[in-house]
Amino acid sequence: MSIAANIVCPHCLTLNRMSSDRDSLSAKCGHCHKKLFEGHPFAVNERAFNKHIQSNDIPVVVDFWAAWCGPCKMIEPIFAALSGEMEPGWRFLRVDTEAERALSARFQIKSIPMLMTFTKGAVVGQRAGAMDKASLRAWLAAF
């Protein structure tokens, strides 16, 4: 018996129902026909962020960052690599705190990089500062 999961398209934000008996990595959006998983984090604005955290049935991890932040630059390739390895079990998103100040204020982002995990719209974990790949993977495994 297959289990269906709701997955938000990172391109058009359409909610897609995906069956567990399908190849998730090759799944395409029913609306825009682009791949639902591409092996890299997606930069999102507030509208896309809200859609992903509220509607995805898979957990979402978000990297809140800024271009001037040294530790943010250090974690970026690690975050990207894990995205490629952990999809389709996770959705990886990036929020530029300079461009999306309302999101930064909403989540009281005081230190960056700030990683936050969400399940069904609720924050289930957060951690400030850069991590190596093994530490980040272990942290995500707890969720």
Image: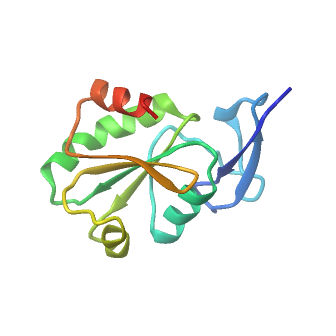
Q: Front-most of 4 and 73?
A: 4
Q: Residue at x 56, y 57 (%)?
A: 52
Q: Position of residue 93 (x, y in %)?
A: 44, 51
Q: Residue at x 59, y 59 (%)?
A: 54
Q: Residue furthest bottom?
A: 102
Quadrant of the rendered structure where residue 139 is? top left
Q: Is residue 124 left or right of residue 107?
A: right
Q: Is 127 placed above or below 52 here?
A: above
Q: Position of residue 83 (x, y in %)?
A: 45, 37
Look at the image and tell me in which quarter the N terminus lies.
top right
Q: Is residue 90 left or right of residue 80?
A: right
Q: Residue at x 25, y 41 (%)?
A: 75
Q: Position of residue 117 (x, y in %)?
A: 43, 47
Q: Front-most of 26 and 99?
A: 99
Q: Residue furthest right?
A: 1
Quadrant of the rendered structure where residue 132 is? top left
Q: Position of residue 80 (x, y in %)?
A: 38, 39
Count of residue discs = 0
Q: Is 103 placed above or below 117 here?
A: below
Q: Is residue 143 left or right of residue 9?
A: left
Q: Residue at x 68, y 34 (%)?
A: 24
Instruction: Specify the color scheme.
Output: rainbow
